[in-house]
Image: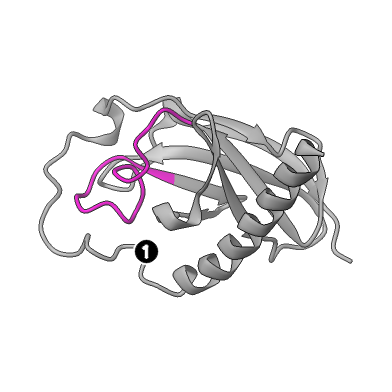
Amino acid sequence: MRLRFKTTMITAALGLLMQAGAALAAADPHAGHHGGTPAVAASSDTKVPGLRLLMPQAGDCVEGQMAIVIETDADLDQATMSAAKIGTHLHIGIDDKSMMPVREQLFSAGNNRYVYLLDLPVDSGKHQVSVYWAGADHQTIETSVQRVEIKVRNP
């Protein structure tokens, strides 16, 4: 009974997150980050928090919408594009497309785990999903990159 309640609550929360995510996706992902030169070290010199891609896993087959689950000890209020100050921030990618979620698009699942919902506007077939940190200069911090290959099936 308790598991069913938790599942129902998570499903409801994800539904609300999808509605909020659609509105936030239309917003400028660089809001609050225009003008001025970032006063941070180059990405290659930046020390970053831990980051693990938990889901999807290599070989997973998905369709329609995909939940991306990450684990990080980062303060996502400071490490996403909604942070008040430019700095190291999260990128989520599929193939060569990169998204910079704002904090409100990352649903907390407890234990430093977060869910990001992604509509799959890609063709059926194999695709690469990645999560990584980028510096204030938006350059990928290579040591943080986590990648998996998935299969997309469009209905």
> Residue 40 appears in which quarter of the rendering?
top left
Q: Residue at x 25, y 26 (%)?
A: 45
Which kind of residue does numbered mark 1 sit on?
Pro
The percent position of residue 22, horizontal first and vertical second, equals 54, 71
In the picture, measured across the screen, residue 42 lies left or right of residue 17, that is left
Name above or below for residue 127 compared with residue 63: above
Q: Residue at x 71, y 43 (%)?
A: 6
Which stretch appears magenta?
A: 72-90
Q: Main secondary structure of the magenta part?
A: loop
Colour scheme in use: one colour
In the picture, measured across the screen, residue 29 lies left or right of residue 18, that is left
Which quadrant: the N terminus? top right
Q: Residue at x 47, y 37 (%)?
A: 132
**Is 73 covered by the magenta stretch?**
yes
In the picture, measured across the screen, residue 120 lies left or right of residue 17, that is right
Secondary structure, mark 1, is: loop
The percent position of residue 16, horizontal first and vertical second, equals 59, 64
> Residue 42 appears in which quarter of the rendering?
top left
Q: Residues within 10 Å of mark 1 (few under 14, many from 20)?
A: some
Front-most of residues 120 and 138: 120
Q: Residue at x 22, y 60 (%)?
A: 33
The percent position of residue 61, horizontal first and vertical second, equals 84, 46
In the picture, measured across the screen, residue 61 lies left or right of residue 133, that is right
The percent position of residue 80, horizontal first and vertical second, equals 36, 48
State how many labels appear. 1
Which quadrant: the C terminus? bottom right
> Residue 70 appears in which quarter of the rendering?
top right
**Is 82 covered by the magenta stretch?**
yes
Q: Which residue is mark 1?
A: 29
Farthest residue to the right: give it. Answer: 155
